[in-house]
Image: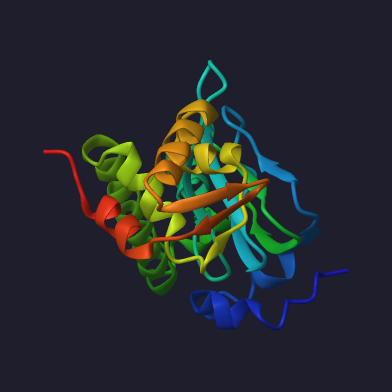
Amino acid sequence: MPTPTPPDLLSLYPALGGLPGLLPRLTVMQVPAGTQLFRENEACQGFPMVLSGEVRVSRSAANGRELELYRVSPGEMCLVSSAGLFADQPLTARGVATCETRLALLSPADFRAALTDDHFRAYVLGLFAARMADLTGLIEAIAFQRLDSRLASALLGHGQQVRATHQALADELGTVREIVTRLLHRFEREGLVELSRECITIRDSAGLRAVAAYQSR
């Protein structure tokens, strides 16, 4: 029996509206938080479209360090999956659901068929370009911005209290927990934050913004 088209699919990914023949063949799944959806060096199983929830895409090194590349929210595109399908090559990163997540999957064959439609191809390439811009910003931050500035930026914008472990912050910044811990203790000595178990209380937002704005030359 054909899979019913999710009612929110076309509102989030409107370019699919011109491809009604492919919609019944979509695989729709709902997964709990922590589910690994794809892994590095595996073949891409299809073009994922997030309907609710979020997918964290990251790359890991042989020493165990991990760098978050981006997150896929509803209506957005996974650059790594798309690149794997475009080039017919193994995936270069892994994707994990950060919370309960519902997504639809367009098979590799159907994705290639959909690319023959001018509207869908232009839509996908537009999303691809937007995601590439995000990655360019990440590369610039890693290459040119000091780690203390990046940590200060990561702490801002979450209200007075940031509920995150030092390891989670290290993963987000692509570094190791020990360095994040040292920097947080430095921030605490300077009166910028107050540390407690899995909670960082912002004491001087203006001071943190000043650190975040400082970039190495």
Which residue is painted at 53% across and 71% down in the image? 75
Residue 86 vertical position relative to residue 27 in the rendered view, above or below:
above
Of 160 and 107, the residue lying toward us: 160
State the image coordinates of residue 82 (x, y, percent, origin top left).
Answer: 48, 49
Residue 12 vertical position relative to residue 169 in the rendered view, above or below:
below
State the image coordinates of residue 19 (x, y, percent, origin top left).
Answer: 56, 74
User: Quadrant of residue 206 in the image?
Assistant: bottom left
Which residue is painted at 64% across and 73% down in the image? 21
Of 171 and 60, the residue lying toward us: 171
Is residue 149 left or right of 85 when viewed as pictured? left
Q: Is residue 92 visible?
A: no
Residue 97 vertical position relative to residue 28 in the rendered view, above or below:
above
Which residue is painted at 62% across and 44% down in the image? 165
Q: Is residue 19 visible?
A: yes
Quadrant showing the C terminus: top left
State the image coordinates of residue 144 (x, y, percent, origin top left).
Answer: 21, 39
User: Quadrant of residue 52 in the image?
Assistant: bottom right
Which residue is painted at 49% across and 43% down in the image? 172
**Residue reaching furthest left?**
217
State the image coordinates of residue 195 (x, y, percent, origin top left).
Answer: 57, 47
**Residue reaching furthest right?**
1
